[in-house]
Amino acid sequence: MNLWGDRARHVVISGDPDALGARAAIDASVSCDFPVDVPALRGRAGVSRYRRWARYMRGFDLVLTYNWGAMDAVMAHRIASPFMRLPPLVHHEDGFNQDEADRLKPQRNLFRRVALGSAAALVVPSATLASIAMLCWGRQSSQVRQIVNGIDVDAYAAAPSRTAIPGFRPAPGTVTVGTLAGLRAVKNLPRLVRSVAPMGNRVRLVIAGDGPEREGIVAQARAVGFDGLVLPGFLTDPWKYIGLFDIFALSSDSEQFPIALVQAMSAGLPVAATDVGDVADMVAVENAPFIVPRDEAALTAALTRLISDAALRREIGEANRRKAHARYREEEMAACYADVYEKAMGRPGVLGGPDIRAGDGALTFSMRTPQNLL
């Protein structure tokens, strides 16, 4: 949204109106509304509710929907599009919560199979999700677009401030293992606590993020007698502090193409992680041995080896940095999104063409002016 500036006007509708933290990142010059008098994304499926959604969509040039929480709007588009003149819809899926970490729900697969039939495109960040879209949701390869997550990799070249993380200072003789994560069950952060605990006071573990699992993580550290846990809460601008980590760790039960991993690679960090989503393919070849099954002993072994070898950490970290700069640049990601949206609308170049440069925004819905994205 920040990238496209006045090329688009936006209307953002959230399934959780109380969770609008990203709103603060939208540039003040961007035209963006957060209306309250709109059809609900949550509720019982029904013809009248779908009709309200379809009528609402008619005021836009493009509808962008995100994840399972917006699927009722997608179904409304599917049902009404043969009878009403509706704008094109592009759906986005970027991963699953704990309830689908191990097995997708058959009823959701069936719902997506039907609802996505009228989508101009389905955008996913990972090859794993692209395969799911075709095998489980019945999408043709021509409808599925994989666009990997990109960031401003150059921002991570700056040296971090030693005081950038509240309550934490790097200490001589210790290794800092860090992660950026919402404190949710699917991240399985107690597993990470248990994995670093055997290293005792040789290690500090920094978990930057907030969420409902905070007390459970603290309780796990207490239960295993680990005193090196630091929980600073959610921190903005990760390029200012992620370089304070010596190792980036990821203990999730489910991921697809985690941006935090791209950020860690851009900062030149080695990674110890569970083998979920596209993680094994994201990292440099040199880092591949440290992407392990969702097994606590294997994650502990990977961390132990990296903690014990500073030269190896530097070698792997530099390889990760090179790959991030070569593959995960935000301007390339933004150009891919612009291409998908412009083709859906049949309006090439309306979002800026190939010369655009991305920011950290995320697009949702907009209004009918030259280009309106809902």
Image (tube, rainbow, N blue to C red):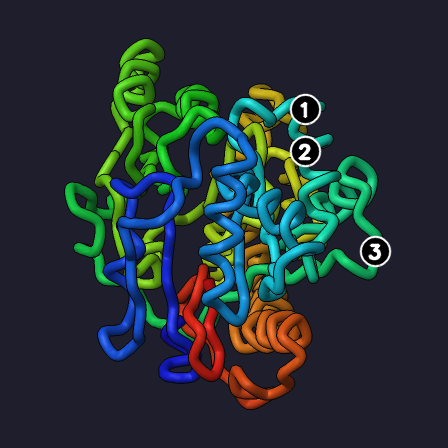
First along the sequence among labels 2 and 3:
2
Instruction: Give the mark nearest the N terminus, 1 or 3.
Output: 1
| Residue depicted at x 56% and y 20% | 296
Frontmost residue, 182 versus 93: 93
Q: Quadrant of residue 5?
A: bottom left
Instruction: Residue 346 in the image: state x and y as whole percent.
Output: 67, 79
Residue furthest to the top: 223
* Residue 95 to residue 239: above or below: above
Given the image, on which type of amino acid does mark 3 rest?
Ser
Q: Residue at x 65, y 29 (%)?
A: 108
Q: Residue at x 62, y 59 (%)?
A: 84
Where does residue 323 sit, x and y in percent of width and height? 63, 65
Q: Nearer the viewer, residue 72 or 350?
A: 72
From the top left corner, tell me how far across and down residue 60 is, in percent.
Answer: 48, 67
**Badge 1 is on which residue?**
107
Towards the viewer: 112 or 175: 112
Picture quarter containing residue 207? top left
Q: CA distance from mark 1 to mark 3?
A: 22 Å
Q: Is residue 238 left or right of residue 290?
A: left
Q: Is residue 331 left or right of residue 198?
A: right
Instruction: Please indicate whether residue 51 sits to the left or right of residue 3 in the image.
Output: right
In the rendered view, tell whether residue 158 sits above or below residue 46.
below
Q: Which residue is mark 3?
A: 141
Local secondary structure at mark 2? helix
Question: Does the residue at mark 1 contact the one at mark 2 (Cβ under 8 Å)?
Answer: yes
Query: Helix or strand or loop: what does disc 1 sit on?
Result: helix
